[in-house]
Amino acid sequence: MKRISRREAMKIVALAGGSILLPVGLQYRGYAQIANGTVAPFTLPFRTPTVLNPVRKDSTTDYYQIRMQKAQVQILPGRTTEVWAYNGIFPGPIIKQRANRKSIVRFINNLDENTSVHLHGMASLPQYDGYALDFIPPGYYKDYVYPNSFAANLWYHDHGLAQTAQNVYMGLAGMYIVQDDEELALPLPKDNYDIPVMIQDRQFASDNSLIFDNQGQTSVMGDTILVNGVAWPRMEVANRKYRFRVLNASSSRAYRLALSTGDALTVIGTDAGLMSAPVNTQDLRLVSGERYDIIIDFSRYPVGTQVELQNLPLPNNTSFANTDKIMRFDVVRSQTDNSVVPSTLRNVEFIPESAAVRTRDFLFELRNQMWMINGNGWDANRIDANPQPGDVEIWTFRNESSGAFHPVHLHLIKSQILDRNGQAPFPYERGNKDVFYLGENETIRLIGRFTPSGKFMYHCHNMVHEDRDMMSQFEIGQNGINPMSALARPLPPPPL
Ligand SMILES: [Cu+2]
């Protein structure tokens, strides 16, 4: 944690016009907006990212274009911060799409880095899944095809081999929301009361530039919590229900969300869509890549109440002065609320254990200073699991260490947790998911149906671990589409 000397503190006070009295020797962080590199929690207004409009539409498809570029953005008071951003905004624009309408998204690389774009949670064909070696080099573009086959809260982010952590940290992440008629027909909070919440942690230098420090290939843990790119925002709300689509888009940090009032959060959806029924929970933990759809009912509070969204402690999360806070809701007005959280949300098919034709075991561990799965690192020429199309399998993930947790992510398929250390999963985890919190000394078993055919990655979603080298691949069936079969092309592109 950064501390400043008395002399530096006096200099800051002088720069601020001498109007702020700072107790001598007090750590400045959290006290006032007085310097670059910091801001007091709950002083900046909440905002949501821009929704991207398609360049054009036809009867089946919406066509989008996103340029990856360096940009200077205002994150903290004072100097701007250089980011590597989709369309130059941080975080990237939100894409909202209807289920079963196709998207074609052209990503243009105007950065100096290799990139690869993964739409996390989408059942994409292998050549559009953001395979780690399927680079869009600087000066190239690639058109990704997305089927949008089911409603869920997804996100697109960089997946370039060995540089995912830094590319995402510098800004390459955005949300992608797919909705279907069934979900839209539910009386849940909508429009201005349906809010995306992307949580990330960052560390800033005194000139407000981003510091990327992976602590010797272990984890990136920032001291500043950003929600939709704003440090610890303050959101004015009405005393009614809101829906929050929460995504942990941090490189490494996990969160354990809770309300300062001690009241329950109502979970209505997991990574891959709505749950069968809402679940109330006092707190909720989520690792990098995980999404939870939650309802907070502010009608419990009189106008004038301030409710903090807190981040409770978790092992192997590095704590700083204000990393126990995420954002604050200020109940500022009363309003009638016609929204309802139905007791049945969706018919989620739970696959019975008896349907599984095979079990596979995966050990996630640090070996010889490398993050490994079953003793192996990444090798594009090696396949570590080969289910046949339509097979139901049980995969067991083991973490025998107390020194790290691992967010395990499977591409392509959605699956369900059977148990964790032999116990039922948390009630709020009982839905379709694609990222699994594999905690310290935990063993989890999940069940999923592997279809359709093709070669896809699975890996730790602590992006520092993923980069070195906790990533492998499965292949469903034989002779599926090669992930490298739709390579990026040099600029300029033809019209979309
Ligand atoms: Cu890991």
Image: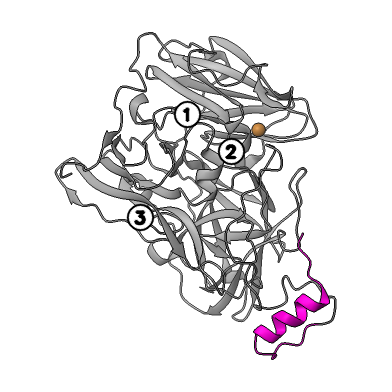
- Whole-percent x and y of residue 13? 71, 84
The answer for how far apart the CA atoms under marks 2 and 3 are is 23 Å
Going from the N terminus, do you reach mark 1 or mark 2 first? 1
| Quarter of the figure with the N terminus | bottom right
In this view of the protein, which residue sits in the foreground, 276 or 94?
A: 94
Q: Is ligand 1 less than 8 Å from the beta carbon at label 2?
A: no
Judging by the rendered image, the residue that carries numbered circle 3 is 87
Give the extent of the magenta segment: 1-22
Judging by the rendered image, the residue that carries numbered circle 1 is 411
In this view of the protein, which residue sits in the foreground, 238 or 182?
A: 238
Find out whether residue 11 is within the magenta segment: yes
Whether residue 450 is visible, yes or no, is yes
Query: How many C-alpha atoms fall within 10 Å of the one at disc 1: few (<14), some, or many (≥20)?
Result: many
The answer for how far apart the CA atoms under marks 1 and 2 are is 15 Å
Q: Quadrant of residue 135?
A: top left
Helix, strand or loop status at disc 1: loop
Checking the image for residue 463, the label placed there is 2
The answer for how far apart the CA atoms under marks 3 and 1 are is 25 Å
- Whole-percent x and y of residue 337? 46, 69
Q: Amino acid at mark 1?
A: His
